[in-house]
């Protein structure tokens, strides 16, 4: 696996620590969260394996290109539409959460429109960037910020205020039957790699997914899931954790750095995670944008002017939807729709893997 | 390429244009704000079940050198709820009240009986209030405590901040409870939260913190004595210091403990009800003061004597908490966390705790008699 694929995976994991994921997990903490998370962990490694394996036959080709080769356009258009929408929502969901967080914690006196437009303009710039530049940006941000993110998380592990009794208490619920919602939410942590349906055009070398890669993905998953679920419980307590809307912000607000530059870590923490999640939004929308572009490819040879118009139109649609949804959605809606989305995502992933399998067979024959 | 230069120029223009939307800082300037250092909550006289909120506001001054004493302003108001009182207080001053730097919440000890949600809700719910704020109980009232300006307080340092969190003083007599810890322990079943108790002297120029309060949702708070507070702090949180007195008929020693650890095991009887708690205390340190000449060769003897004393004191403390049906150490929580979840696990513990048996074993390891024999 190329190192960029790992970046994609990690960026999705980090972004979801802050977004709606943890809250969904905690809402089911007494109804089988742990078993489902363990199941999702293994299944997450499996889908990564399946994905990398099915792209092995098509090095340097993105999904739309593969579809063009082997499938009728009338079949590929609905597929691309669905996938584009799914990826768009993935970005939108993180975007809304972050706008919400910014308004709540960093700039409480700013209007939602200003915050959102600042986000959207910069994201749009990222969306129409070349895929290659996006990957390089991702690497740069990772090198600069991920060490800090890890530092703060590890600091939480060693904090004397963390109560391991609460963590153990959460673990005593291990014998509950699994829950589908928790399973699909946890599985979403592992879907970062699926961005290669577009970005695969950049990976010319054949990728392998052997035992080494599987172990790495597995360990990343264990660390992410354990941190996302158990650390807030240790800090905030197991009883009534489901009441907290942003468990991770609350948790980071509970770290104190006695001799740090700023005693209250939450601001630094928010900025770091914001930067990584921001890139995650850019990537998701970039994928979505590319998928849609392939849908609206009216003629084989489009003029430059036509392409510009198409880009503009697509961007405007992206903006309008984002504005309408962000302003309208309440926190409760966000929570419910996110659950629906995660539930749907599982089906889409299975469908996508099935499609890739069919394509693989066609390519062979 | 599909990204024609026109779009890039357009987006660049948009990006630059968005700079114009910014009005400098998105918020009001620092000189238009008042920084609240601490909040005090007392029961209200005017309102039934209302609260009297007192704010300690740090006043800005030009240079630290030019001011000899820290400057504070105090404002208080009564209201049916904490939020309402603070909202009214906003109309008493000309600037915005900024609660983001508020680091100590002081609560009148009488308010600590029963469920705290009525007045703590505001602090947990508001996003700008830090969860690492300290919470403390006050005697005789929160307002009196806030208004104490200790003679040792220097400009630009708030005494109420230095007391807790080991940032200045580190003493096993001072319990530190953060806001998030209070919320966690108060809502959890099987543990009671402990708050430090701030008192003052008659002249009102000292803040004295060496007692603490155990609070519970069901009953009146219980005050821990100085010794109990110390044992709570050193057993549960591993605090250390120069403070452990042990004595027998002839000898009186003061130990300087540098390491303290407690571990315990809850064992069950045959029908799965918890029966005994076996506590093992390990202390390490040196002798700091004695009323007689000591001998290094007799360290084992002193160890034995100290162990017995610690064992006795700890046992009494555990016993007293049991009689009050309080559990500041979280034995119940530990019990819940070590058994696979059953529906009646909390009930079972609550029934068993009043009669549970304590077996305390202490191991004091003294390494030296100090600089002299």
Image (cartoon, coloured by chain):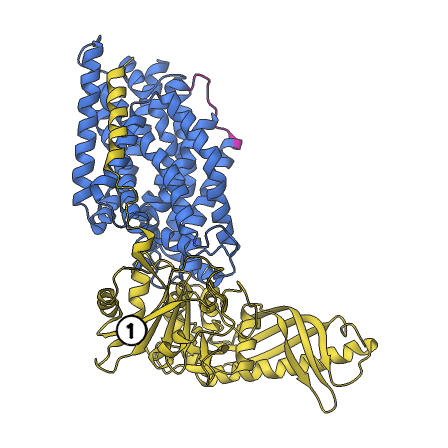
Chain colours: A blue, B yellow
Is B57 situated left or right of A295 in this image? right
Query: Which element is circle 1 on?
Result: strand
- Numbered range of the magenta stretch: A203-212
Q: Is residue B218 visible?
A: yes
Q: Chain of mark 1?
A: B
Q: Residue B41, relative to residue A302: is it above or below?
A: below
Q: Residue A257, relative to residue B85: is it above or below?
A: above
Q: Nearer the viewer, residue A292 or B204?
A: B204
Q: Residue B80, relative to residue B3: is it above or below?
A: below
Residue drawn at x 50%, y 40% is A147
Residue B157 lies, in percent from the top left, at 47, 63
Q: Nearer the viewer, residue B238 or A272?
A: A272
Quarter of the rendering containing residue A278: top left
Residue A219 lies, in percent from the top left, at 49, 41
Residue B50 lies, in percent from the top left, at 24, 77
Quarter of the rendering containing residue A279: top left
Is A250 situated left or right of A97 in this image? right
Q: Is residue A28 visible?
A: no
Rate crowding at label 1 as few (under 14), some (14 to 19) or many (20 or more) other CA atoms within 10 Å. Answer: some
**Is A209 inside the magenta-drawn segment?**
yes
Give the labeled residue for mark 1: B76
């Amino acid at each position: 696996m190329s190192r960029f694929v790992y970046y994609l995976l990690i960026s999705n994991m980090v972004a979801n620590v802050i977004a709606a994921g943890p809250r969904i997990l905690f809402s089911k903490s007494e109804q089988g969260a742990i078993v489902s998370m363990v199941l999702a962990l293994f299944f997450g490694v499996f889908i990564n394996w399946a994905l990398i394996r099915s792209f092995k036959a098509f090095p340097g080709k993105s999904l739309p290109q593969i579809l063009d080769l082997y499938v009728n356009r009338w079949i590929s258009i609905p597929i691309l539409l669905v996938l584009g929408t799914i990826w768009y929502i993935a970005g939108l969901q993180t975007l809304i959460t972050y706008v919400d967080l910014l308004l709540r914690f960093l700039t409480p006196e700013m209007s939602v429109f200003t915050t959102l437009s600042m986000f959207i303009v910069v994201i749009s710039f990222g969306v129409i960037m070349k895929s290659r530049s996006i990957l390089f940006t991702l690497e740069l941000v990772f090198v600069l910020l991920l060490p800090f993110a890890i530092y703060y998380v590890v600091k939480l592990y060693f904090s004397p205020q963390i109560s391991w009794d609460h963590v153990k208490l959460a673990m005593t619920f291990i014998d509950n039957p699994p829950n589908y919602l928790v399973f699909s939410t946890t599985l979403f942590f592992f879907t970062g790699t699926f961005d290669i349906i577009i970005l695969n055009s950049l990976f010319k070398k054949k990728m392998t997914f052997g035992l080494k890669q599987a172990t790495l993905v597995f360990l990343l998953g264990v660390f992410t899931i354990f941190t996302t679920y158990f650390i807030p419980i240790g800090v905030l307590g197991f009883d009534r954790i489901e009441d907290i809307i942003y468990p991770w912000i609350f948790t980071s607000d509970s770290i104190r750095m006695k001799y740090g530059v700023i005693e209250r870590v939450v601001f630094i923490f928010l900025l770091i995670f914001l930067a990584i999640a921001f890139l995650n939004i850019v990537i998701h929308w970039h994928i979505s944008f590319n998928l849609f572009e392939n849908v609206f490819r009216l003629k084989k040879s489009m003029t430059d002017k036509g392409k510009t118009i198409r880009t503009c139109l697509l961007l405007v649609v992206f903006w309008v939807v984002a504005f309408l949804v962000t302003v309208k959605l309440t926190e409760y809606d966000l929570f419910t729709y996110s659950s629906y989305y995660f539930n749907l995502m599982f089906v889409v992933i299975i469908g996508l893997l099935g499609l890739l399998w069919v394509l693989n067979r066609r390519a062979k024959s | 390429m599909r990204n024609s230069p026109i779009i890039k120029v357009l987006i660049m223009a948009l990006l630059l244009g968005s700079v114009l939307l910014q009005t400098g800082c998105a918020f009001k300037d620092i000189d238009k704000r008042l920084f609240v250092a601490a909040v005090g909550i007392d029961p209200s006289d005017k309102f039934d079940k209302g609260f009297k909120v007192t704010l300690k506001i740090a006043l800005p001054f030009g240079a630290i050198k030019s001011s000899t004493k820290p400057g504070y302003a105090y404002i208080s108001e009564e209201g049916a709820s904490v939020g309402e009182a603070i909202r009214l207080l906003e109309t008493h001053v000309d600037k915005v009240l900024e609660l983001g730097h508020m680091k100590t919440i002081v609560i009148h000890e009488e308010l600590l009986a029963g469920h705290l949600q009525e007045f703590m809700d505001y602090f947990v719910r508001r996003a700008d209030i830090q969860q690492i704020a300290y919470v403390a109980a006050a005697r005789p009232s929160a307002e009196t405590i806030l208004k104490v300006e200790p003679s040792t307080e220097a400009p630009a340092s708030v005494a109420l901040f230095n007391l807790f969190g080991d940032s200045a003083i580190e003493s096993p007599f001072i319990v530190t409870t953060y806001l998030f810890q209070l919320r966690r322990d108060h809502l959890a079943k099987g543990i009671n939260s402990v708050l430090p108790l701030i008192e003052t002297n008659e002249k009102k120029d000292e803040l004295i913190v060496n007692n603490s309060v155990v609070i519970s949702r069901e009953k009146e708070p219980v005050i821990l004595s100085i010794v109990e507070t110390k044992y709570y702090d050193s057993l549960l949180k591993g605090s250390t210091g120069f403070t452990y007195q042990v004595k027998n008929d002839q000898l009186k020693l003061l130990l300087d403990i540098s390491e303290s650890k407690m571990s315990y095991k809850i064992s069950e009887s045959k029908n799965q009800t918890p029966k005994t708690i076996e506590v093992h205390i390990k202390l390490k340190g040196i002798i700091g003061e004695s009323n007689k000449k000591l001998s290094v060769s007799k360290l084992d003897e002193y160890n034995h004597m100290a162990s017995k004393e610690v064992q006795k004191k700890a046992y009494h403390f555990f016993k007293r908490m049991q009689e009050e049906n309080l559990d500041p150490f979280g034995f119940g929580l530990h019990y819940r966390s070590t058994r696979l979840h059953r529906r009646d696990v909390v009930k079972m513990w609550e029934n068993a705790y009043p009669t549970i048996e304590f077996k305390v074993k202490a191991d004091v390891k003294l390494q030296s008699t100090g600089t002299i024999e």
